[in-house]
Image: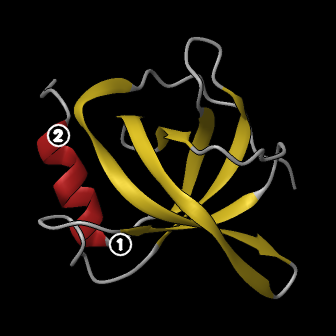
Amino acid sequence: LRLVPVDEHVEPLSSPIKVQVALIQQSETTVIEDGLLTSLSARHATLEVSSPLTDRSQVRLRLTEPPNKDLGADLYGKILGVESNSQGYKLRFTWIPAAATEYFATLLPRK
């Protein structure tokens, strides 16, 4: 099974979202550091961390500051590569709780 690449435009955020980043390898989850979501779309984001991540790394994100930390569950995603126009990584969400989807929608321009 292969995921079809989607080139979805991500919107820069006026205030980055602070997250705790954990790397998922096999059945182990290791918290690596705090990071920032600096741009966002419904299914993608730009994740900035100082530790190197490899393509196809699976990550768990936990929002770490109010008002966005009580969204009911963690977010999961996959690293798609280095973002060409920033210092971050392209991230595709693989699971987003409904409360996070609603919160993210408030941050994105209406179409």
Q: Nearer the viewer, residue 97 or 29?
A: 29
Find residue 70 and report its image quarter: bottom left
Q: Nearer the viewer, residue 108 or 13?
A: 13
Residue 78's tag is none
Residue hosting label 2: 107
Mark 1–mark 2 distance (CA, rounded to whole Å): 16 Å
Q: Is residue 50 above or below residue 13?
A: below
Of the two numbered discs 1 and 2 on the same chain, state the one appearing first in sequence.
1
Q: Where does residue 20 sit, x and y in percent of width and height?
A: 48, 66
User: Which amino acid, mark 1?
Assistant: Pro
Task: Say left or right for 67 vs 13.
Answer: left
Find residue 67 and report its image quarter: bottom left
Q: Quadrant of the N terminus?
A: bottom right
Q: Which of 46 and 95 is in front in this view?
A: 46
Q: Where does residue 13 sit, x and y in percent of width and height?
A: 26, 30
Of tags 1 and 2, the one toward the viewer is 2
Q: Can residue 40 be seen in this view?
A: no
Q: Is residue 73 visible?
A: yes
**Label 1–label 2 contact, CB within 8 A:** no
Q: In this view, does 71 lie above or below 17?
A: below
User: Which amino acid, mark 2?
Assistant: Leu
User: Which residue occupies 80% across, 86% down?
Assistant: 28
Q: In this view, does 37 lie above or below 98?
A: above
Residue furthest toward the bottom?
27
Q: Nearer the viewer, residue 69 or 10?
A: 69
Task: Say left or right for 66 vs 18.
Answer: left
Q: How many marks?
A: 2
Q: Where does residue 17 sit, x and y in percent of width and height?
A: 31, 49
Residue furthest toward the top?
85
User: Which residue occupies 81% across, 49% down?
Assistant: 56
Residue 97's tag is 1
